[in-house]
Amino acid sequence: MEIEHTKSASGGKFFSNDNGEEIAEMTYKNRDEIVMVIDHTFVNEKHRKEGLGGKLVKEAVDYARENNKKIIPQCPFAREVFKENSSYSDVLK
């Protein structure tokens, strides 16, 4: 499934839709121009075990790398994904 990204001055979200229904989202706030704080991740119960949460975090990591940003994974799910993926350490704040 495709991951989309919307952003504003204060933060943004990565999300996935299925037939017009949002089935997964991960939100973040911008602490400043460099630091993103992932504060929430949710995957619809029907779509859990499909790896969508991890894909959302990966999209945030890719975005951070492309834009020279750092991430603070405040939400428990994102924090766990960062612990399990040492390759994400370059964007970890």
Image (tube, rainbow, N blue to C red):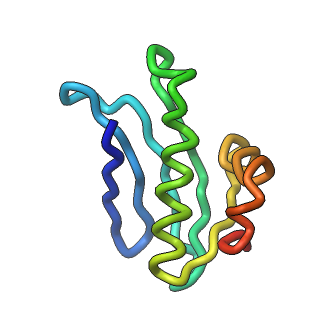
**Which residue appears farthest toward the top when viewing the image?**
46
What percent of the width, then of the height, locates residue 6? 31, 59
Residue 93, compared with residue 86, is above or below; it is: below
Farthest residue, direction left = 20
Using residue 5 as the reference point, say whether residue 34 is left or right of it.
right
Q: Quadrant of the C terminus?
A: bottom right
In the rendered image, residue 51, in percent from the top left (x then y), is placed at: 54, 32
Residue 77 at x, y percent in the picture? 68, 41
Give the quarter of the figure containing the N terminus: top left
At a point 52% along the width and 59% down the height, the residue shown is 28
How far across and down, in percent of the image, does residue 16 sit?
Answer: 35, 39
Q: Nearer the viewer, residue 75 or 68?
A: 68
- On the picture, is 55 further left or further right than 74? left
**Corner quadrant of residue 31:** bottom right
Position above or below: 81 against 5: above
| Residue depicted at x 38% and y 75% | 9
- Asked whether 71 or 32 is in front, the reply is 71
Report whether 57 appears left or right of 6. Answer: right
Q: Quadrant of residue 36?
A: bottom right
Relative height, residue 26 to residue 17 (above, below): below
User: Residue visible at 46% across and 20% down?
Assistant: 47
User: Going by the picture, which residue comes out furthest to the front?
Assistant: 87
Count of all numbered marks drawn on residues in the image: 0
